[in-house]
Structure formats: structure tokens, C-alpha cells
Amino acid sequence: MLSALVIDDELLAREELSELLEESNKVKVIDTASNAIEGLKKINQLKPDVVFLDIQMPQITGIELLGMLDPDTMPKVVFVTAYDQYAIQAFEDNAFDYLLKPVDPQRLDKTICRLGKVHKKQADIRQLAPEQLVHVPCIGLNRIMIIPAEEVQFAHSDITGVQVQTREQSATTQLTLKVLEEKTPLLRCHRQYLINIKSIKEIKLLENGLAEIITCSGHTVPVSRRYLKTLKEMLGFH
């Protein structure tokens, strides 16, 4: 039986689709989410086999959420959309599955059967994802923040997850360092650190080929030997 997560900002739509999936006796809905930020967190925590993802959601759309998933660990994705047949032609061209609202039980059954057989390549799905992320969603105790990607000075991973630092604040994101490196202005400077080159105030050269960055806001970011040469070249030093 497939495990599924339903992400939709409309309560009625979540409930109706969840009921249809459970009635199929082939899919177990392990949870639902009302927005993309909550959905991203639950994808990482629960690791469902498939995500039924609404496209039109406030703040962060389903398409944007798709671009935030790590291609190495992302689940199968089925879009749920209110778009008409003409608007979804682009989705069909990319060879992945979608459902029109209101969801037709017979059409859903075809989707479930397809999921149970040969899974489509996620690379095809990701062709629809944006090449660059405009926002970095962050979640913490009693707060949800959407930080413009260009405002992130650096990011690093620790035992609690991935932390992003702006000039004013630090926050935790569900995005991986790999996704941040690929889809934001951040560059790799250390195995556990990414840096926004525009946030560099100075680079202190240390012994053994190491270095550390001092950011415009006074934070210190380590630079490993592996990435120092590339970083210096990006800054125009050869």
C-alpha cells in the first residue's frame, strides 16, 4: 500500500481527496497539510511514497514547492489543479500525472494504478520547477517566515537542521543545503556552509590553506581548502 500526503489550502478539498484515496484501499493517507511550508516539513519528516499537491496556494505555490524538494529523496508527485484542459497541456508534455478539481473517482483510480506500476521519472516532473527560488521558507516555534533568497547572507547545517542567516535574524529551513546551493545565490565555501558572495566583507587567510569569511553583519563563516580557490576566483583573485 502506498503512503500519501495531501497538500491543499482548502480544507474541503483535502478531506474529499483523502476520503477517495482511503476508499481505494490502495493508498494510506498518513497526513495532510494546508500550505507549502507545512507540506515541505511533513515531506521531510514522513517521507511519503506520493504527494498529492495543489498547484494554486497562497505565498508558495505547488510549482514552487516542487523546486524546493531534493531530487535524491523526493517522493512521487501528483498535481491537483483547477486549471482547464488547455492550461494543463504543458503538464502533459512533461509526462507526469495530474488530477483536475473536482477529482473524479475513476480518474483517480487510473492515477493510483499508474503509481502502483511503473513510476515516472522525477526528472521529468522537475522540468516544471523554477530554476531559482525566490523565497526560502522557514519554520520554528509558533512562527512561519518566508525570507527572500537574496537576503540570506549564509546558511549552514547542524544537528537541528539547516539554518539561514540574514542581516537581522537566524531561522531554520526545511530546505537542504544542496537545494539552496542549486537554486539560490549561495555558494559552497565549506562542507556545512554556503555563503552569499555579496555578504562578504573580508576573507581572513589562515594556516594550512584554510580561511574564514567575515560577513557584512559581523558573522564568521569557515572556508575549507577545497573551496577557497573557487571562492577567490569568484571575487576576482587568481
Image (cartoon, rainbow, N blue to C red):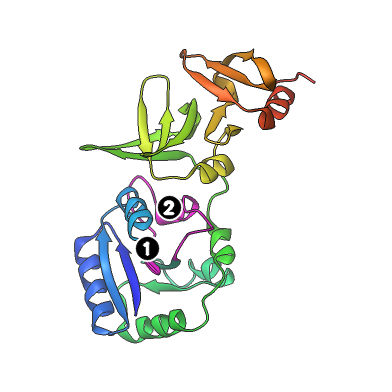
Q: Position of residue 125 (x, y in %)?
A: 54, 64
Q: Is residue 80 left or right of residue 87?
A: left
Indicate yes or no whether the magenta region holds residue 217. Answer: no
Marks 2 and 1, how far apart in space?
9 Å
Indicate yes or no whether the magenta region holds residue 71. Answer: yes
Q: Is residue 12 left or right of residue 208?
A: left
Residues in magenta, as a range: 48-75
The residue singled out by tag 2 in the image is 65
Q: Position of residue 217 (x, y in %)?
A: 46, 14
The residue located at (51%, 71%) in the rendering is 96
- Quadrant containing the C terminus in the rendered view: top right
Q: Earlier in the sequence, mark 2 or mark 1?
A: 1
Dot label at residue 231: none
Dot label at residue 53: 1
At numbered mark 1, what does the secondary structure look like: helix, strand or loop? strand
Query: Is residue 109 placed above or below 201 in the rendered structure?
Result: below
Residue 66 versus residue 162: which sits nearer the camera? 162
Q: Position of residue 183 (x, y in %)?
A: 55, 43
Mark 2 surroundings within 10 Å by alpha-carbon count, few (fewer than 14), some (14 through 19), many (20 or more): many
Residue 22 versus residue 133: which sits nearer the camera? 22
- Badge 2 vs badge 1, beta-carbon distance below 8 Å: yes
The residue located at (47%, 53%) in the rendering is 69
Mark 1 surroundings within 10 Å by alpha-carbon count, few (fewer than 14), some (14 through 19), many (20 or more): many
